[in-house]
């Protein structure tokens, strides 16, 4: 072991937990007559509901919510928070999700009354600061991706994908060109094919070759004049760079198709290579991945879409635009596909992302990508002597292991190893994705983990593997240190209890 | 050099050495040289945190319309509700803020249980048995409802009341470019939807309750129309209204969608907000997004997990009826906390306070000579459409100088003329709203200022 990795790494297994009882729901903590709400004294006459509304509109009874004191509410929610793993607690090597550290200053900025307290319908002359933030962010995202202009409206990556597909549709239709197919590699995220269907297109899947990249010959075989475009993630979901991207771009453009870049893995390439320079026409970014805006337990995200010059006129709108020096206004692109969000997008997420970008600067963003790739390769190399790496060659920001041989020889699956890692104080890697790797475990350490934490993670993997071979029952019973043990997912689906009232 | 990277120079050298590399540039050998950026990104140098803080405070100060500077009378789907310190403190706990989607339930019970409580509360508020874990916002939730309705009814004819918020209608029309649904927008008569021309088979009928001009629609009539045409009944509801008014479920709605921003999320310049989605048990297999269910762990203890996963995009891929993956969980958690804080009594008092303030504003307005209610006999909940002598956008500008965000100009929401308004009114309709945070004194001052500003 290197002297550098002898220091303690960041394991969450020291987190204190009082016990393993279930937390009652707020409905069970409720006592009639208790309350916590307090409103302003308004001095407005207390008309009754009957005085204000025709009887036909009135509810028969109150909506039962909960009746708890503020103290009990605080204790309940705080206990819930203690039953939750988070980036702030420890390493979260969840592949494809880019669970990097979320700088606190970005939360402080998002909480400024001058940003958080602004009504979205206030006219532009009252919201110049917000419009400037949006224009500045758009410019930065375009420089990072090598594109011409962007919409900030899509609320998440999948919303960005669908927006991008509608842009493709609008572009082709404007050319009087009816096309019906979108090509997607078999390693793609599930949102890609789902978005294609909602965009009114059919999916054509292309296989990966034995190096884990798009099979160029297979791609060329399915290209034709009815292909509207291709959706690619690069580096792809195996963490590998599509080295033939220039040839892929040329082939797709030759048949009149467009290239869509799924920006899920943008964290690997900032300042190194740009989607626009690879030949992409449309790019979505996941600000909650690359630009460190917190994931919030599953959202909010933000999925801006940047495009090359020939697609700018179709962008959703209205777009924040600098109409005169230092003066900002909303402008609708001439052939806009329309609005894709109720207002302007997830604005506070956008502000956080801009703060992150400006703190780093161009060189800092490149450094982020370098370290993300360095960490991923370090863990790949560190684990490659004991685990099978799918497509074992230098990776980008993440690496995919295959536990197929472990399953065959010892009956231990990827999910079992993932669960056992939790007992060692780490969140599980992504399991069973991408679909083309048997017993896949996908690790994305991100750039903000230290080499000591990577070493601790590697050792946790070794402990789990050792157990898998020598103490299989322990692995199959894992995790035993977490607030609950393995959960009966089949029962949840079979005997559906979707609310407290359905119990 | 401002960043959050832990690597020391010695560690960098050691890690590269471990990989047999001599420079970080070699990490990118797989990227063809011809494609690599031969220059640095064209951006300013990194800015240390304290400087960034100063810069964003300056940007924020350019937002003259923030609610700490102008008294907010704007609504239209975004409301200046009380955001108490206890909710702010709890919802900003980093265990919730910095977690990912709860894919590993053993270490995600906190978020999962909060969502389960949220689903329960939204189901009760909507009067429907099923609620999902949230969608992006009200407008995109409506898109999902339309898609569900078409899939369920088998008819792609979508009848949309023009009382639905204009932005929401625009979003529905955008996404219909991909799905090919036929969207038919129905006009209003005296502020309420005029359904008289609708006949034949329909897939989905969408009504807003209250509509964006504030009017309370006759949902019994909409239910009857849905039965007659075979359509699913989708209600785009103001969820706060359920505190005192009949819920969509009580009228027999099949789907309720709504904007949940008012439950624990700041105005936030429009996002992140909270898309609410509730439906009947019959539609549960078509429900978009995630849903959490209760189950047990191996030791028989109560536990929660995302369920009915086979509906979702990562499993169904191109056969999925929704592509939603990331949602607005943090806002849903905040809503569950805010609704817990409000409680049964507070939720009713909130609705009553909004309605009382709105009624007070309407009453005081009756003495105005320059601003009148557009539809004086229409029942409203907490939104008022006011016809001003001066163009509404000018009124808003003048009112801002007097310390008020007077409301929203209807013309700023529509794209030119709109079936919800007469062309003559369009530029003269001001949409105002009152929440529990407005006092009688503030409303009096507003009325006084409006008299002059609306002239």
Image (cartoon, coloured by chain):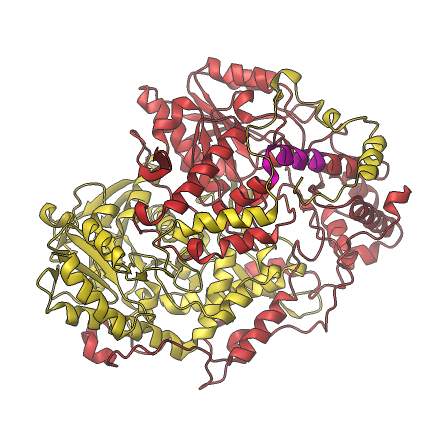
Give coordinates of residue B81: x percent, y percent.
37, 66
Position of A392 compared to A358: left or right? right
Residue B358 appears in the figure: no
Give coordinates of residue B150: x percent, y percent.
33, 46
- Is A400 in front, or is A43? A43
Provide the letter of the chain coloured yellow.
Answer: B
Provide the letter of the chain coloured red.
Answer: A
- Is A99 in front, or is B269? B269
B319 up-or-down from A47: above or below: above
In the picture, which quadrant includes the N terminus of chain A? top right
Residue drawn at the location 66% of the way across and 53% of the way down: A87
Residue B367 in which image quadrant: bottom left
Position of B150 compared to A300: left or right? left
Give coordinates of residue B376: x percent, y percent.
11, 65
Boundaries of the magenta span: A360-373
Residue A375 appears in the figure: yes
Q: Does the magenta stretch include residue A449?
A: no
């Amino acid at each position: 072991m290197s002297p550098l990795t002898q220091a303690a790494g960041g394991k969450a297994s020291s987190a204190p937990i009082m016990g393993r009882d279930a937390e009652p729901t707020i409905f069970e903590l409720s006592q009639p007559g208790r309350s916590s709400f307090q409103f302003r004294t308004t001095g407005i006459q207390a008309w009754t509901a009957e005085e204000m509304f025709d009887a036909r509109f009135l509810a028969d009874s109150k909506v039962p919510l909960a009746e708890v004191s503020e103290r009990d509410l605080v204790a309940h929610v705080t206990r819930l928070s203690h039953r939750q793993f988070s980036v702030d607690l420890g390493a979260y090597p969840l592949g494809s999700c880019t669970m990097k550290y979320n700088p606190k200053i970005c939360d402080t900025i998002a909480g400024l009354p001058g940003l958080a307290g602004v009504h979205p319908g206030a006219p532009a002359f009252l919201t110049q600061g917000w419009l400037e933030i949006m224009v500045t962010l758009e410019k930065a995202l375009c420089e990072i991706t090598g594109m011409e202009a962007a919409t900030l409206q899509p609320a998440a990556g999948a919303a960005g994908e669908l927006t991008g597909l509608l842009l493709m549709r609008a572009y082709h239709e404007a050319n009087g060109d009816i096309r019906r197919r979108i090509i997607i590699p078999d390693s793609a995220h599930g949102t890609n094919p789902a978005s294609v269907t909602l965009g009114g297109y059919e999916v054509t899947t292309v296989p990966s070759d034995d190096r884990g990249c798009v099979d160029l010959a297979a791609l060329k075989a399915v290209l034709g004049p009815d292909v509207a475009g291709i959706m690619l993630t690069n580096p792809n979901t195996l963490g590998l760079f599509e080295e033939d991207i220039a040839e892929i771009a040329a082939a797709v453009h030759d048949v009149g198709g467009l290239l869509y870049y799924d920006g899920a893995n943008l964290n690997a390439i900032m300042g190194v290579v740009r989607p626009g320079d690879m030949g992409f026409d449309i790019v979505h970014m996941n600000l909650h991945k690359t630009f460190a805006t917190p994931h919030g337990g599953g959202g909010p995200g933000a999925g801006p879409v940047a495009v090359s010059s020939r697609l700018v006129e179709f962008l959703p709108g209205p777009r924040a635009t600098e109409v005169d020096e230092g003066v900002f206004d909303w402008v609708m692109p001439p052939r806009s596909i329309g609005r894709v969000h109720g207002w302007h997008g997830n604005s506070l997420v956008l502000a956080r992302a801009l703060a992150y970008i400006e703190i780093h600067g161009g060189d800092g963003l490149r450094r982020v990508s370098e370290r993300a790739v360095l960490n991923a390769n370090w863990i790949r190399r560190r684990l490659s002597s004991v685990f099978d790496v799918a497509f074992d060659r230098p990776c980008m920001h993440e690496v995919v292991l295959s536990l197929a041989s472990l399953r065959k020889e010892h009956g231990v699956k990827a999910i079992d190893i993932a669960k056992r890692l939790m007992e060692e104080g780490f969140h599980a890697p992504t399991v069973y994705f991408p679909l083309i790797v048997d017993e896949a475990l996908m690790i994305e350490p991100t750039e903000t983990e230290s080499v000591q934490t990577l070493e601790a993670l590697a050792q946790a993997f070794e402990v789990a593997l050792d157990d898998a071979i020598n103490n299989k029952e322990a692995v199959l019973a894992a995790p035993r240190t977490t607030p609950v043990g393995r959960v009966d997912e089949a029962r949840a689906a079979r005997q559906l209890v979707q609310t407290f009232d359905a119990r | 050099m401002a960043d959050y990277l832990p690597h020391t120079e010695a560690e960098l050298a050691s890690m590269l050495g471990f990989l047999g590399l001599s420079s970080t540039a070699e990490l990118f050998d797989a990227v063809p040289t011809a494609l690599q950026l031969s220059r640095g990104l064209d951006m300013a140098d990194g800015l240390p945190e304290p400087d960034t803080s100063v810069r964003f405070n300056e940007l924020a100060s350019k937002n003259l319309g923030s609610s700490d500077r102008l008294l907010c009378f704007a609504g239209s789907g975004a409301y200046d509700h009380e955001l108490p310190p206890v909710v702010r403190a709890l919802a900003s706990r980093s265990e919730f803020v910095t977690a990912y989607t709860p894919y590993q339930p053993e270490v995600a019970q906190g978020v999962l249980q909060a969502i389960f409580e949220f689903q329960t509360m939204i189901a009760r508020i909507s009067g429907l048995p099923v609620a999902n874990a949230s969608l992006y916002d009200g407008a995109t939730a409506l898109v999902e409802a339309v898609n569900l309705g078409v899939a369920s009814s088998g008819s792609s004819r979508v009848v949309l009341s023009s009382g639905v918020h204009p932005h929401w209608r625009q979003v529905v029309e955008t996404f219909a470019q991909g799905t090919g649904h036929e969207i038919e927008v129905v006009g209003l008569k005296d502020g309420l939807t005029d359904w008289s021309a609708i006949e034949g088979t329909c897939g989905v009928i969408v009504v807003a309750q209250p509509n964006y001009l504030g009017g309370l629609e006759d949902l019994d009539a909409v239910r009857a129309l849905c039965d007659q045409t075979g359509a699913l009944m989708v209600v785009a509801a103001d969820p706060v209204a359920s505190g005192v008014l009949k819920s969509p479920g009580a009228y027999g709605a099949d789907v309720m969608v709504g904007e949940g921003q008012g439950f624990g999320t700041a105005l936030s310049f429009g996002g992140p907000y909270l898309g609410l989605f509730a439906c009947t048990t019959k539609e549960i297999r078509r429900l978009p997004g995630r849903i959490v269910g209760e189950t047990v762990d191996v030791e028989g203890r109560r536990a929660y997990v995302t369920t009915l996963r086979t509906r979702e995009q990562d499993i169904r891929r191109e056969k999925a009826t929704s592509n939603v993956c990331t949602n607005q969980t943090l806002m849903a958690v905040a809503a569950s906390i805010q609704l817990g804080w409000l409680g049964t009594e507070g939720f009713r008092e909130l609705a009553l306070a909004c309605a009382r303030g709105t009624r007070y504003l309407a009453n005081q307005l009756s003495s105005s000579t320059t601003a009148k209610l557009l539809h004086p006999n229409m029942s409203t909940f907490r939104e008022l459409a006011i016809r001003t002598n001066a163009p509404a956008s000018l009124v808003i500008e003048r009112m801002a100088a007097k310390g008020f965000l007077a409301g929203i100009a209807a013309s700023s929401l529509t794209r030119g003329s709109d079936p919800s308004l007469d062309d003559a009114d369009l530029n003269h309709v001001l949409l105002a709203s009152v929440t529990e945070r407005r006092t009688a004194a503030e409303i009096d001052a507003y009325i006084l200022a409006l008299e002059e500003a609306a002239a």
